[in-house]
Image (cartoon, grey):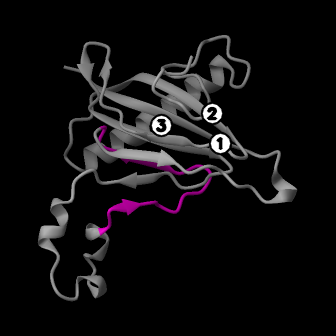
Amino acid sequence: YKPSDWKKSVHTTFPNISPDNTFISKEENDRLKFDLINDIKEVFSDLNMPNDIYFPNFWYNIYHNGQGQESHNHISEVGERLAYWSGIYYYQHSTPTVFKRSDYLYRTQEFPGHEKSQLNSCFYQTYYPHVEDGDMVLFPPYLEHYVPDLQFEEKNKEQMRVTFAFNIGLKV
């Protein structure tokens, strides 16, 4: 299944991975979700954020050479509520996801010399974190993001980028 507003070519299991999936076994999927949710709970606890959480949606995206994903956000209903937080786990042949601000209000706070300050990254319109296999990025669901079309080197044309994406629900 691919949502109708996803126009680019990507192999996805959105909104959830089925138990009979051939790419990842149910046992491996359950173990990955268990490990990720526990890591996220620890981070949320350290940040004084509510951490009674679960994954109402957990899926993977596979991108081959020339494939990417258009700009989107994760503001959608997950079960009965909106997502509390969202995330991406970089599994294989990781390349950055580009996060972008949809507003320009941050520009009203630019000050002379901000380019040389430690706050300079706060003024970027786009941000693409350096990621490696095994990294996880958490972000608010309203944050727009996309995957640029992949261009693997000629010798690596058969590689595929694999990420696991998820929405986080807050138990109430």
Residue receiving disc 3: 36
Membership of 127 in magenta stretch: yes
Residues packed near mark 1 inside 10 Å, few (<14), some (14 to 19) or many (20 plus) = some
- Please name the predominant secondary structure of the magenta segment in the image: loop
Residue receiving disc 2: 9
Q: Locate the C terminus and report the quarter of the image it occupies.
A: top left
Q: Is residue 95 above or below residue 146?
A: below
Mark 2 or 3: the one toward you: 2
Q: In whole angstroms, how far apart are the C-alphas of marks 2 and 3?
A: 27 Å
Q: Is residue 119 above or below residue 104?
A: below
Q: Residue furthest left?
A: 108
State which region is magenta.
124-141
Residue receiving disc 1: 67
> Badges 2 and 1: C-beta atoms under 8 Å apart?
yes
Q: In whole angstroms, how far apart are the C-alphas of marks 2 and 1?
A: 6 Å
Residue 18 drawn at (x, y percent): 59, 13
Most foreground residue, 104 or 86: 104
Residue 131 drawn at (x, y percent): 54, 58
Q: Locate the N terminus and report the quarter of the image it occupies.
A: top right
Residue 7 drawn at (x, y percent): 53, 31
Query: Disc 1 on helix, strand or loop?
Result: loop
Query: Disc 2 on helix, strand or loop?
Result: loop
- Where is residue 125, by image quadrant? bottom left
Q: Is residue 37 above or below residue 2?
A: below
Residue beneath the point at 56% across and 51% down? 148
Membership of 165 in magenta stretch: no
Query: Disc 3 on helix, strand or loop?
Result: helix
Mark 1 or 3: the one toward you: 1
Residue beneath the point at 41% across and 46% down? 145
Q: Earlier in the sequence, mark 1 or mark 3?
A: 3
